[in-house]
């Protein structure tokens, strides 16, 4: 029970403190830009190549389902495209970003904690929430939606290519936006934005609470990346459920 | 001088990336080979500890992931099932999706985060603290004591967890289908049982096993090659997760095309 409470509560407290500290001290925009570059530049290859492979896998699976059921995989194309935009693009990109950025944020912050650099920052009148957490949160909220858009594009292109080359159907069916409407884009944006907010917070909770030596750094990294990945799945579930209940 | 430097930059990057790739592949091969050699002299107590830590302790996380995966698959496919008017086939479609793709993939990603990072961090801590040198110094083989038990335990745990994952995911799928789409359980399990064969289950188990092997080999190789202080431990853990995820997506693609081609 306390594990569940701290799973949801600690990031919320971290968010509240970060917002309060940034309102008091001002947001370090330059540092946010640096973090956005770190997040984007480091994750973009992982996200795009991972999503390209994922798109190819999905088409292969859709093809083996379709041969048993409707005959031609191109029939599933428009529905597949909507599913990718609404669901799989954001959540898979966010999970890949969680493993890349969540792990590296948790590792950086916990290294700073065990080396007492965070205390040193406080001694020199800095605030760890405003100076360390806020830029990462801003970078996540802006960066994860951008990364998931790129990931969706990569998955779509690879799906269309595999469909045309390997299965000999018209690949353009896999980028047919017939079923895509504003609600799908809203759901995708909410998922990506929510994950972008949650990943840095979960990593910061794990990283700033690290106490000890090298061992603590390892533990903090592990718990940060696990919390970030599970959080992405939970956010995806919550948004999907909300849209399902509203029948959008 | 400067223009030459700018022109050489991509070449230098290419060379560095190529060297890194070769070095990484070599390290992976070495770890795999020495693990196989270390198997007969496997440390039993370490194996038991790793089995508890990787398998039993991961159970809540794996089951939570499975439940979420099942419900998400039904919530999403519900849209298309209604669109194509094929409600009765939900059991088959959702079961196929979880067995072939989402069960193994999500379990692999979560376990790569949990076990991959922890393995790399533990081995990197020992490497950085000189404990691995110490083991060698007293004539013990670190691969037999530290690496082989982890690889074996990871493989056994992943195969066992995959069974629970599939079970829980399909249970949650059927309940979610009942609650959101009003599909009777009998209809769900009817098409599930009629249209899926044991071979479909095998596909998921093969994938999970391959991911388990990839996670344990990648994370131990990354952990053993850590050099430095506390910073190196964090970097090793982070890069083990990233490489584990990349390996999972590549393996997913290879295995899916291979198995789909073989079963068609």
Image (cartoon, grey):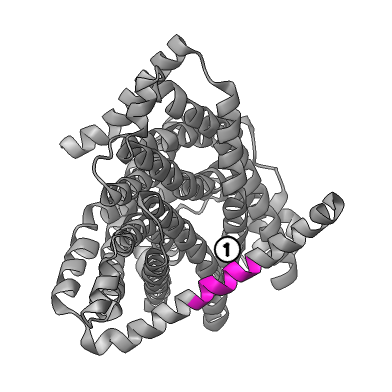
- Badge 1 crowding class, 10 Å Cα cut-off, few under 14, some 14 to 19, many 20 or more, is many
Quadrant in the rendering for residue B30: bottom left
Residue sitting at x 46%, y 32% = A194
**A17 above or below A69?**
above
Q: Nearer the viewer, residue A134 or B156?
A: A134
Residue sitting at x 81%, y 52% = B6
Image location of residue B261, percent across then percent down:
58, 79
Residue sitting at x 16%, y 35% = A2
Residue sitting at x 27%, y 65% = B161
Q: Nearer the viewer, residue B239 or B256?
A: B239
Q: Nearer the viewer, residue B263 or B163?
A: B163
Q: Provide the residue designation for mark 1.
A: A62
Residue B56 in view here: yes
Q: Nearer the viewer, residue A68 or B47?
A: B47
Membership of B229 in magenta stretch: no
Quadrant in the rendering for residue B186: bottom left
Q: Which residues are magenta?
A: B17-26
Image location of residue A5, percent across then percent down:
22, 32
Task: State which quarter of the image contains the C terminus of chain B.
Answer: bottom right
Q: Residue furthest front?
A: B1
Image location of residue B146, percent across then percent down:
26, 73
Image location of residue B175, percent across then percent down:
30, 49
Give the left or right position of residue B254, taking residue B184 as reference.
right
**B80 above or below B122?**
above
Which element carries disc 1, helix, strand or loop? helix
Q: Residue furthest left?
A: B45
């Amino acid at each position: 029970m306390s594990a569940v409470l701290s799973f949801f509560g600690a990031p919320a407290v971290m968010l509240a403190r970060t917002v309060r500290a940034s309102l008091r001290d001002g947001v370090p925009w330059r540092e946010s830009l640096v973090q956005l570059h770190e997040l984007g530049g480091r994750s973009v290859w992982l996200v795009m190549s991972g999503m390209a492979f994922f798109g190819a896998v999905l088409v292969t699976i859709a093809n083996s389902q379709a041969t048993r059921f409707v005959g031609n995989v191109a029939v599933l194309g428009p529905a597949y495209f909507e599913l990718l935009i609404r669901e799989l693009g954001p959540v898979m990109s966010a999970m890949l970003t969680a493993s890349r950025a969540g792990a590296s944020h948790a590792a950086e912050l916990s290294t700073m904690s065990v080396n007492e650099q965070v205390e040193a920052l406080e001694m020199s009148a800095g605030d760890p929430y405003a100076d360390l957490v806020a830029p990462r949160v801003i970078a996540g909220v802006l960066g994860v939606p951008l990364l998931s858009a790129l990931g969706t594009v990569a998955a779509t292109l690879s799906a269309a290519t595999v469909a045309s080359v390997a299965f000999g159907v018209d690949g353009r069916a896999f980028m047919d936006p017939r079923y895509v409407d504003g609600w799908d884009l809203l759901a995708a944006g909410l998922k990506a934005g929510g994950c972008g907010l949650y990943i840095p917070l979960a990593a910061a909770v794990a990283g700033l609470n690290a106490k000890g030596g090298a061992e603590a750094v390892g533990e903090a990294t592990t718990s940060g990346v696990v919390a970030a990945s599970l959080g992405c799945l939970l956010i995806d579930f919550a948004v999907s459920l909300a849209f399902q209940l509203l029948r959008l | 001088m400067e223009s030459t430097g700018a022109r050489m930059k991509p070449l230098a990057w290419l060379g560095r990336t190529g060297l890194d790739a070769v070095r990484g592949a070599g390290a992976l091969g070495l770890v795999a080979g020495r693990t196989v050699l270390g198997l007969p002299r496997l440390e039993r107590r370490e194996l038991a500890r790793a089995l508890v830590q990787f398998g039993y302790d991961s159970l809540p996380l794996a089951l939570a992931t499975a439940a979420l995966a099942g419900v998400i698959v039904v919530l999403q496919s519900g849209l298309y099932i209604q669109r194509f008017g094929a409600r009765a086939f939900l059991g088959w479609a959702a079961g196929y999706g979880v067995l072939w793709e989402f069960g193994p993939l999500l379990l692999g990603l979560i376990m790569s985060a949990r076990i991959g990072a922890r393995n790399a961090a533990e081995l990197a801590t020992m490497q950085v603290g000189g404990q691995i040198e110490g083991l060698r110094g007293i004539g013990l083989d670190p691969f037999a004591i530290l690496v082989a038990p982890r690889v074996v335990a990871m493989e056994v745990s992943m195969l066992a967890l995959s069974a629970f994952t599939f079970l829980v995911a399909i249970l949650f799928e059927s309940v979610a289908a009942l609650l959101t789409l009003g599909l009777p359980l009998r209809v769900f399990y009817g098409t599930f049982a009629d249209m899926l064969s044991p071979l479909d289950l095998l596909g998921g188990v093969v994938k999970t096993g391959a991911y388990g092997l990839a996670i344990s080999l990648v994370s131990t190789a990354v952990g053993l090659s850590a050099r430095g202080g506390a910073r190196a431990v964090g970097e090793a853990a982070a890069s083990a997760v990233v490489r584990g995820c990349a390996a999972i997506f590549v393996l997913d693609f290879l295995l899916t095309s291979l198995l789909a081609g073989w079963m068609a």
